[in-house]
Amino acid sequence: HGTSRLNAAGHLEIGGCDVTELKAEYGTPLYIMDEALIRRRCREYMDAFAATGLGFQVAYASKAFSVMAMCRLVDQEGLSLDVVSDGELYTALKAGFPPERIHFHGNNKTPEEIEMALDAEIGCFVVDNFTELALLEAIAAERGANVRILLRVTPGVEAHAHHAYAATGQTDSKFGFDIGNGSALEAVRAAEAAAHLDLLGVHSHIGSQIFETEGFQLAVERVAAFARKAKEELGASFRVVNLGGGFGIRYVEGDTPLEVSEYVAAIAGAVKTHFAGIDAALPEIWVEPGRSIVGDAGTTLYTVGTSKDIPGVRKYIAVDGGMTDNPRPALYESKYEAILANRAAEPAAETVSIAGKCCESGDMLIWDVELPEPKSGDLLAVACTGAYNYSMASNYNRIRRPAVVFVENGRSDLVVRRETRDDIVAGDVIPRRLAAQQP
Ligand code: LLP
């Protein structure tokens, strides 16, 4: 992927940095992010949308990987930012991200989060349900504010990896207003009646790690039919239609994502077809890619420790991280590819399984990968760990979260320092009555 290559020493090099040197400088486990590849993905989206001739915003879904340096990079590339909590919002604001390009998502925004976002004067709220609609109007009224919103609707289209898409009449989702049962139309009515809310349009998100365009096109068709209905019955106009994220990436052989430009062209084409004639102008298209911006730019570097060979059954190789830095195999049975990064030129010699160091059998990173016989001290690089790894990392077993570095053109820069043991106990408090007790 990206700027990764094998150098003359037989080592993996990313962004011009030899990973054995990165290990010497930062230790392992280490998340290594290929900055040039992240920028390339950002530009692919921006260029593809510019070519559509329609108005647009590309909001990076920061849930995939939210750190201050990433917010700076995304800002430099001209993208907007999707946040889902006060923590993601705080990260963006601290990084100096322009608040007017921040979109606030989530199905249970607290009053405190809403106040914080209004204080910051963010660009838009994606309103998920009637409770939030009323709460937002009440808080906005108190402040005399005028708040831009999208309504999240569920178009009854679901898409995931491993199956194309399902056109369901599905009402059973925790997210959004259902188009099928009239609640979305009711939400438009309520939003139009709310004096302090400015309804920009609607939002739909159909799934994640999607490899085809049909699901998006069907979502556009259903949202457009809804827009037509909202126009006819309520006189509502949608200036924005947000199609969410979900664009897939290649983790392993057999994954068949499309090019960014293909997803974008399909969505823009569907908007041009289905929104024609509803209003004088076509709506702006907004999207929220997360995984496809950062996923394949990330590599996690581990040091090999112990091994256990069960003859005729399996050979386990344990590394110094695991489900704490990458919970996806344990959670979703996600598949990854790996190489021995310090012996990258050597041919595969055996099939092994990569285990983490947590105290449970489910803590596996890869079942069955072909490698040169790994030895204690070797470096293992797991590819495509840029999305939903650092952001979903935990301190299970009180294991410290790894450092994150950006690499580019032979330079490496720390963007998150490794947690210390003191970080681990930083929030702990021993109540006086326990402190006072002598053993
Ligand atoms: N917009 C909304 C409203 C979303 O819910 C999501 C992802 C995105 C955008 C970004 O989707 P992406 O482009 O990254 O597929 N933890 C899971 C993924 C959960 C995705 C949740 N929502 C994983 O590790 O695969």
Image (cartoon, rainbow, N blue to C red):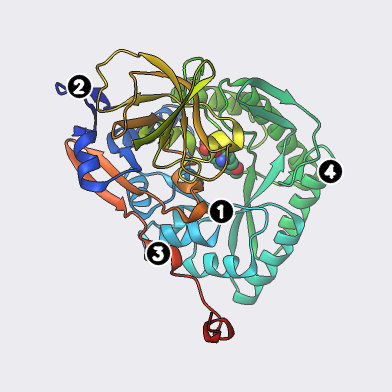
Q: Amino acid at mark 4?
A: Gly
User: Which is more N-terminal, label 4 or label 1?
Assistant: 1
Task: Name the element at disc 4.
Answer: loop
User: Disc 4 to disc 2, how far (Cα)?
Assistant: 61 Å
User: Which is more N-terminal, label 1 or label 3?
Assistant: 1
Q: Amino acid at mark 3?
A: Asp
- Which of the two discs, 3 and 1, sits closer to the camera? 3
User: Which is more N-terminal, label 3 or label 4?
Assistant: 4
User: Which is more N-terminal, label 2 or label 1?
Assistant: 2
Q: Which residue, given by chain and number where applicable, does mark 4 sit on?
A: 182
Instruction: Point out residue 131 in the picture as x, y percentages from the top left corner.
Output: 75, 61
Mark 4: few/some/many CA within 10 Å (<14, 14-19, 20+): few
Q: Is residue 88 above or below residue 355?
A: below
User: Disc 2 to disc 3, how far (Cα)?
Assistant: 36 Å
Q: Is residue 400 above or below residue 359?
A: below
Q: Which residue, given by chain and number where applicable, does mark 1 sit on?
A: 84
Q: Which residue, given by chain and number where applicable, does mark 3 sit on?
A: 423
Q: Is residue 311 above or below residue 142?
A: above
- Which of the two discs, 1 and 4, sits closer to the camera? 1
Ligand 1 position by quadrant = top right
Instruction: Point out residue 227 in the picture as x, y percentages from the top left corner.
Output: 71, 38
Q: Nearer the viewer, residue 295 or 191?
A: 295
User: Disc 4 to disc 3, how far (Cα)?
Assistant: 49 Å
Quadrant containing the N terminus is top left
Q: Amino acid at mark 1?
A: Val
The image quadrant that residue 371 belongs to is: top left
Q: Which residue, given by chain and number where applicable, does mark 2 sit on?
A: 10
Task: Name the element at disc 1.
Answer: loop
Q: Nearer the viewer, residue 205 or 3?
A: 3
Let me know if residue 243 appears in the view. Answer: no
